[in-house]
Amino acid sequence: MDIDWGAVIIGFILSIILGGILAVIIPGVGALLGWLIAGIVVGYMVGGTAGNGAANGAVSGLFGAIIVSILLLIFGTLILGLIGFAAATATSFILIIGSLGVLIIMAVGGAIGAAIKG
């Protein structure tokens, strides 16, 4: 199982863009659909087995959650000081726990994309 970091970064960017756009167009399920499509793209890019696509899709979803958590901590602290840091820390823990859903959705999408290509 090799992680293709180029595909992971593209999947991360696509998950933000597609998730945001489709969440506005289709309230409720649009973000989930955007994450699934981003996972499919990652899986298609890496190819190989469905497990390889799922692993790359999952890493892409986890990467997004970690980046958003870090940005929350930085900007929360810069804007509101210690109170912002405390609030951003609590939010980051919740975000990391909630990212398991995104991780699963993007892993399923990665497996589908790899199966389509292979």
Image (cartoon, grey):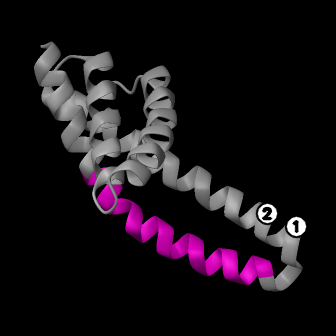
Residue 78 is marked as: 1
Q: Amino acid at mark 1?
A: Leu
Q: Is residue 85 left or right of residue 12?
A: right
Q: Quadrant of the N terminus?
A: top left
Q: Quadrant of the C terminus?
A: top left
Q: Can you name the residue that lies furthest to the top here?
A: 118
Q: Within the image, what quadrant is residue 73 found in?
A: bottom right
Q: Within the image, what quadrant is residue 11 found in?
A: top left
Front-lying residue, 40 or 56: 40
Residue 108 placement (x, y as % from top left): 19, 42
- Find the magenta span and give its range: 84-104
Please tell me whether mark 2 sits on a helix, a strand or a loop.
Answer: helix
The structure residue drawn at horizontal position 16% and vertical position 14%, both measured from the top left corner, is: 117
Inspect this view and state whether residue 40 appears: yes
The structure residue drawn at horizontal position 76% and vertical position 77%, both measured from the top left corner, is: 85
State if disc 2 and disc 1 touch (CB < 8 Å). yes
Residue labelled with disc 2:
75
Q: Is residue 4 magenta?
A: no
Q: Can you name the residue that lies furthest to the front here?
A: 25
